[in-house]
Amino acid sequence: MDFKIEGPLLKQSSVCVPILRTSPDWFGIEEAILNYEREIEHLPTFLAKADGSVLGFLSLKQHNPFSSEIHVMAVHPSAQRGGIGRALVAAAEVHARGLGVEYMQVKTLGPSRLDEGYARTRTFYEAMGFRPLEEFKQIWDENNPCLVMVKRM
Ligand SMILES: CC(C)(COP(=O)(O)OP(=O)(O)OC[C@H]1O[C@@H](n2cnc3c(N)ncnc32)[C@H](O)[C@@H]1OP(=O)(O)O)[C@@H](O)C(=O)NCCC(=O)NCCS
């Protein structure tokens, strides 16, 4: 697939939120989408574009000099499995490494709640080199176990 990665850019929520809305199984709660909208405005964001259209994005959050987090990412369903997610993660890693960051984390739904979609999400992150660290039921809630995955940069 032909696409290019741009970023990091700020104030990209107007092009990112429509991508979130294409995956309601992951981003189906309106309040959560509105939170992401506010957060993405202030987070360094990478875009995958083809013919001027945004097909995917990744927003990064740096927690301290050693650690950054993939705060949110999504690829349009029609463009998934074409290498965009991999390219977005690679661009984010190059940027974070340039800042001296040593560890990248991502939080996602843990395996103790059976969910085919999130099982695929975890497979993607594992393919990108992330490893499951620990599942926490206190970060989100009992019904939404949060799996922290990490990657040494
Ligand atoms: C997860 C997501 C970002 C991946 O983006 P993508 O562009 O489809 O991923 P890529 O094509 O770069 O895949 C890279 C590798 O990850 C793995 N992978 C990706 N999707 C997979 C799937 N559905 N099943 C199994 N492995 C998968 C494969 O190893 C793949 O390499 P390959 O295609 O050469 O075999 C995308 O599927 C998505 O937006 N999903 C919905 C929202 C989501 O899960 N967001 C994540 C945080 S909540």
Image (tube, rainbow, N blue to C red):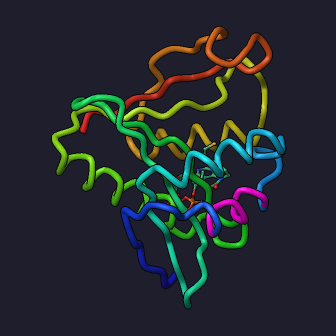
* Rendering quadrant holding ligand 1: bottom right
Q: Picture coordinates of residue 42 (x, y %)?
A: 48, 50
Indicate whether residue 125 is drawn in magenta: no
Indicate whether residue 18 is drawn in magenta: yes
Q: Picture coordinates of residue 40 (x, y %)?
A: 55, 52
Q: Picture coordinates of residue 85 (x, y %)?
A: 51, 59
Please give left or right for residue 124 compared with residue 30 in the image: left
Instruction: Examine the image and state in which quarter residue 115 appears.
Output: top right
Q: Picture coordinates of residue 141 (x, y %)?
A: 73, 14
Q: Main secondary structure of the magenta part?
A: helix
Near-viewer residue (90 or 6) = 6
Instruction: Examine the image and state in which quarter residue 136 appears.
Output: top right
* Residue at 68% across, 42% down: 35
128 in relation to 64, above or below = below
* Residue at 55% across, 70% down: 82
* Residue at 61% across, 56% down: 74
125 in relation to 46, above or below = above
Near-viewer residue (130 or 73) = 73
Total marks shown come to 0
Q: Which residues are magenta?
A: 15-21
53 in relation to 18, above or below = below
* Residue at 39% across, 29% down: 150
Instruction: Examine the image and state in which quarter residue 6 appears.
Output: bottom left
What is the quadrant of the C terminus in the image?
top left
Please give left or right for residue 49 compared with residue 64 in the image: right
